[in-house]
Image (cartoon, helix red, strand yellow):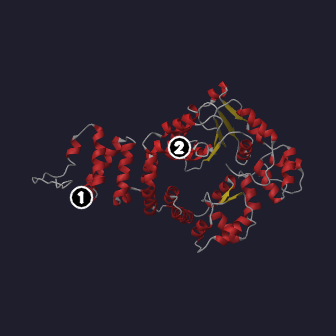
Amino acid sequence: MPLLGAHVIGRPRVIAALQEAARDRSVLVVTAPAGSGKTTAIAQLLHDRPGPTGWLQLGEADSTPGRLVTYLAAAVDAIDPAVAATTVGLLGDGLSPEDCAATLAESLPAGCTLVIDDVHHVEVRAPALRVLRVLIDALSPGALLVLVSRRLVHLDLAREVLSGRVGVLPDRELSFREDEVAELLGAHGVPGDPQAVTAASRGWAAGIVFDALRGRAGPTATDGTGADPFFRYLGSEVIDGLPADLREAVLRSAPLELVTPGRLAVLLGLGDGDDIFTRICREQLPGTRDPDGLRYHPRFREFLLDRLHHRPPEEVADLMGRCGRALAADGLVEDAADCLIAAGDAEAAADAVEDAASTLMRRGDWDKLLAWCAAVGEPVIARRSRLRGLQIRALLMSRRQEDIALLVRGIRATGEFDRHRAENPDVAAWAAWALHGSGDLRPLLALTPPADPRRAVHPRGRGR
């Protein structure tokens, strides 16, 4: 659960509305635009709510079913470690992510609360949404699932809302009212006209908070240019006023979900990142400092990434490559693979994919593994026996029989299969085994070794 900052004010009106929306319900849905104070309000709700709690904040990379279930289990570990361990074990034993999600949901103890924040990150990922749908359907009596999102994702909850199983908090309830704006300005020690700030920000939490930090009259609701006015505000009032070297460091750190001195050193090509990290933290930029590092406010990071991607493509690619290497050095090989693929560094990405593959295979995230293989490209895979074997097993486990047959025909035509049979028989064996699912055994005969009249006995046991 995120920590509440020193300047967070109590909002009994909002907490009461949340409590009412959650009363006697299994699911609470909170949707509102970025920077509306959703996460803070839910964190405040949990402080007053009895029972154990677990919190999962989703990111763009958490859209594969196996990874989502793995992280759900990690969040549930704070509620019931035994349930979390059982879920991870079942996933590793080959149970589908959907069935694992159902088992997890059915095992949650009464009185617990599980929060999934930033659900919008998986809204276009049908496999991940199926996991969430199963989680909702199988939720044990007395447990509360809280879904927090910028948008109402397609989980088909209308019937549950009408039946009273799902509660919804309208986004207007989160808007700051004039008395709350006055209290917030006072908490930050910033003089201002609460009425004017409320009118300018329209009760938008992020606008008020950033305004309070900068002592301004509040961002305008529109600037007439079509650009995001909040982005313009962040640019003119937060970033552009920084020293040039510090501004560059902040922009280049945008791809990192967690900024650390070591990762900054790799991104910026420095021997040591401690000094620049300390300077960034000293600026009190929108974000949260915790023992692991610095996490930018999601809306602020979105702004930084938007600025960064207006730079020349080759500069962005170089930065993503550095980011990938920094993450790989910290053991975050899944995230490293995504960054290195974005950088266009196929060979380095292939190294990360091979390192991350065992984790994905234990989770059954075959689609993700195949997407990585497609992004790395056929020429790279053809040179790497291990990667080819992973690709074949992923196709086999995801039951893509036609794709397997096409692939095996291709590697036979190029001579790659014969090379694997001689040098890496495991890969050749997986390729042959993958073909048996078609029911047509004739192609398998062509893959058998040449006839050998000699008898061969492999010694084993007592000389036999």
Task: Give the side of residue 322 with respect to residue 92, left or right.
Answer: right
Residue under the point 67% across and 26% down: 164
Where is residue 167 drawn, in percent x and y? 69, 32
Circle 2 residue: 69
Where is residue 46 drawn, in percent x and y? 71, 42
- Residue extending farthest to the left is 453
Task: Give the side of residue 307 with respect to residue 100, left or right.
Answer: right
Question: Three-letter amino acid code at disc 2?
Answer: Val
Please determine whether, in this image, residue 444 is positioned above or below residue 299: above
Please determine whether, in this image, residue 148 is positioned above or below residue 138: below
| Crowd around label 2: few <14 · some 14–19 · many ≥20 (10 Å) | many
Circle 1 residue: 422
Secondary structure under tag 1 reads: helix
Query: Does any portion of residue 133 appear in the rendered image?
Result: no
Where is residue 204 drawn, in percent x and y? 78, 47
Query: Does any portion of residue 18 appear in the rendered image?
Result: yes
On the image, which quarter does residue 269 sit in?
Answer: bottom right
In primary-sequence order, the first of circles 2 and 1 is 2
Whole-Å distance between the Cαs marked 2 and 1? Answer: 39 Å
Residue under the point 21% across and 41% down: 442
Please determine whether, in this image, residue 358 is positioned above or below residue 46: below
Depth check: 416 or 72 in front? 72
Residue under the point 65% across and 71% down: 274
Secondary structure under tag 2 reads: helix
